[in-house]
Amino acid sequence: MGFFSDLGKKTSETTGKIARETKLKMKINENKGKIEDIYEEIGKKVYEKHIREENIDIKTDLAEECSKLDALSKEIEDARLEILKLNQKKLCSKCSAEIEAGAVFCPKCGEKQTAEPTIKEEALEKLENAEIPPEKKEEAEAVKEDLKEEKQENE
Ligand SMILES: [Zn+2]
C-alpha cells in the first residue's frame, strides 16, 4: 500500500499542513485573549454606569465591543473549520459532532450528510492521472477499484 497511500501526501505537504494548523491554533488563542479583554472592557463600562446610576444601552454603549466580539468569534469559527478540514474531518450538519470528512451518516445522530468531494475521490483522480511504474500497475488497479467502490457507496 505504501506507494499509493503516500500519493498526494508528500513530506513537504505534511509539514505545510502542520505549520498551517499551528498558525490557525495560534490565531484562535490570540482571538480568545482579545475576547477576554473585550469582556473586561464591557464589565468595566457596565460597572461605571452602575456607579453613575445610569442605565446601559447595549445598542449604543456596547455596539463597538459587540461587533468586535462577533468578528473575533467568526474568525475562531473559520479557523476551527479549517483545522477540521486539514485533518479530513467535518462537523455534522445536524448535531455538530466532529466526524470523518467522507462520512455519509453521522455516527452520533445518524443524520445523512450532504455529499462533498472526499479526499478519496481526489486521490482517485490523482491516481488516474498518475504515471504508474509497470511493476505497480496491478497494485494500482486494486487501489482504484477500492476507491471507486467507496465512491459509489457515497453516492
Ligand atoms: Zn450528527
Image: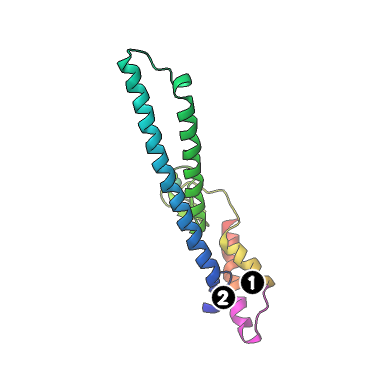
Q: Residue furthest bottom?
A: 135
**Which residue is painted at 61% across and 63% down in the image?**
122
The residue shown at (55%, 78%) is 3
Residue for point 60% across, 71% down: 145
Front residue of 91 and 77: 77
At which x and y percent is residue 154? 57, 57
The amino acid marked with disc number 1 is Leu
Going by the picture, which residue comes out furthest to the top?
53
Q: Residue at x 50, y 40 (%)?
A: 74
Q: Is residue 76 left or right of residue 7?
A: left
Neighbour tally class for label 2: few under 14, some 14-19, many 20 plus, Cα within 10 Å: some
Count of numbered tags: 2
Residue tagged 2: 4
The image position of residue 133, as x and y in percent, is 65, 83
Res. 53 visible in picture = yes
Magenta span: predominant SS is: helix
Kind of residue indicated by mark 2: Phe
Q: Quadrant of the C terminus?
A: bottom right
Query: In the rendered structure, which segment of residues is drawn in magenta?
Result: 130-142
Residue 74 lies in the magenta-colored region: no
Q: Is residue 2 above or below residue 23?
A: below
* Mark with earlier residue (2, 1): 2
User: Are the residues tagged 2 and 1 within 8 Å (C-beta)?
Assistant: yes
User: Disc 2 on helix, strand or loop?
Assistant: helix
Disc 1 target residue? 127
- The relative height of residue 78 versus residue 139 in the rendered view (above or below) is above
Expressed as whole percent of the image width and height from the top left, the position of residue 64 reads 49, 28
Q: Quadrant of residue 124?
A: bottom right
Coloration mode: rainbow
SS at mark 1 in the image: helix
x and y percent of residue 14 in the render?
A: 51, 67
